[in-house]
Amino acid sequence: MNNESSSIPLARQIRLLAKSPPEKSLAILFETLHSEDQAISAWSAWSLAQIGTETVIDKLFNLLSHSEASPRIWAIWSLGQIHQAYAIEKLMLALEHQDSEIRSRAAVSLGKQKVSAALPFLEKLLVEDSDYSVRGQAAIALGFLGGDKAIELLQRILDDPEIYVHTQATYSLGAIKDPKATEALIKALTHHYPDVRRLAVSMLGERELEDVVEPIIHTLNDSQYFVRLKAVEALGRMATKAAIKGLKIAAHDSDEYVREEANKQLEQLKRKLNFSYLQSFSSHSKPLLTEIPLLGIFSDLEVKNYVYSSAFGKSRKYLISINNPGLAPPITYQLIPEQLRLEFHDLETPKHDLSYRLPSEEDILKVIDFASKIIPIQGDLLVHCCRGITRSSAVALTVITYLLGEDRETEALDVVLAACPQALPNLWIVELADNILNRKGKLIDVVENYRNRNQSF
């Protein structure tokens, strides 16, 4: 790094190297990849993946033999981010690596990239690998791949004696949105492992399909109370006559916890799905300007109740739904005409844990494309994430910044804070938006200054 860029945080300097000529940046990035500061290592690995040349891929593959664990882990993570045939070749070779951690991560990366050619190799890991963590990660990979063969293999390894393996197999069946996977989960409701039954009923509940209600009701006779408890929670999501009938049966269960949960779910179904604080929505978050729609920033629970509410009727026009990968939005969201679904974790720095997904440039391009179609006078814009604080506020800020135009970044943040006073925009999303909208750091500065003034967050 040079003195001219000393005013720029080191992590951002490293990210900028991803756009520099490789002959100048590679030596620095491979050096900083070994940093003791995990954030620096993380962004170095990210930058190397962005460059993604064959030279980078070869060097990363060679690092898999490094004597220290950290460079190995970041190298395999980086290889998994490079969606190129040559990188996939290296990942396939890594499935036979002596380090079980490398085998595991290679398997998941291939699954995430939906490399169907990896299926025979994943099957071999499931059958022959002595390390249960590798078998479990291979099951996760199958969940990403999907398809008949993956479902068949997952059903087979439900019988694996290791709890980590058979639970991951159940989760993966739940991740595959296919009628055959649903059938496999229904069959798993009578499995000899209680944890398989518990997870199967949860996965079926998340599908919110009417034809799974009766099989779930049957699990109210399960010998394990925690399986029956999950059945009650699943029925509470259904809100059908049959589900309510099942909840009434569960209200007389022999276990106190099951009875309490059944009564709680019944009570929630009786309530009017509306919150008093939503009634003030139109007064506290009116837009400052006519160029933008009325903005609402909500948590998962709040937006679900807003969608159900009749208080705002036809004003519900646009929805950006954000959540972790694999979590399906409730079918009630279909009540809103224009929708964008985004799936990534609330991260501001990469994690080498492959279950996490960092927001990407592609995600923000989708947001801006969606924003370009918004006509403010036609209705409200709702943005939600799990807590309604970080991801949703950053995405909302991106939309408002785009709609207002250049040099109005402070006004854009004011609109977001009016809609959500506790907003804490995700800085990585803000940086992506700043770059794509060519704001030359102005949007980043506005948000960083706001965060610095509110250190209590």
Image: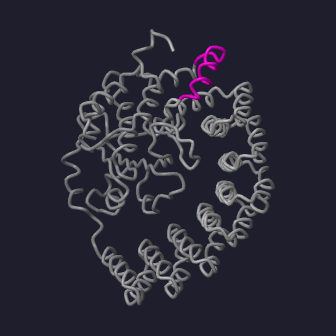
- From the top left corner, tell me how far across and down residue 413 is, in percent: 29, 33
Q: Is residue 177 at all visible to an observer of this figure? A: no
Q: Is residue 28 magenta?
A: yes
Taking depth in this image into account, of 61 and 378 the one nearest to the observer is: 61
Residue 138's place in the image compared with 401, above or below, is: below
Q: In the shown orientation, is residue 160 left or right of residue 25?
A: right
Quarter assignment of residue 455: top left
Residue 151's place in the image compared with 439, above or below, is: below
- Quarter of the picture holding the C terminus: top left
- From the top left corner, tell me how far across and down residue 205 is, in percent: 50, 71
What residue is rendered at 78% in x and 47% in y? 96
Q: Is residue 71 at all visible to an observer of this figure? A: yes
What residue is rendered at 27% in x and 70% in y? 272
Q: In the shown orientation, is residue 291 left or right of residue 164?
A: left
Q: How many marks?
A: 0
- From the top left corner, tell me how far across and down residue 127 is, in percent: 78, 63
What residue is rendered at 66% in x and 50% in y? 108
Q: In the shown orientation, is residue 417 left or right of residue 337?
A: left
Q: Residue furthest top?
A: 4
Quarter assignment of residue 440: top left
Q: In the shown orientation, is residue 33 left or right of residue 12?
A: right
Q: Residue furthest front?
A: 67
What residue is rendered at 56% in x and 46% in y? 353
The stretch in magenta equals 20-35
Taking depth in this image into account, of 120 and 365 the one nearest to the observer is: 120
Q: Main secondary structure of the magenta part?
A: helix
Colour treatment of the image: one colour
Residue 429's place in the image compared with 378, above or below, is: above
- From the top left corner, tell me how far across and down residue 279 is, in percent: 21, 57
Q: Is residue 66 magenta?
A: no
Residue 166's place in the image compared with 283, above or below, is: below
Taking depth in this image into account, of 47 and 96 the one nearest to the observer is: 96
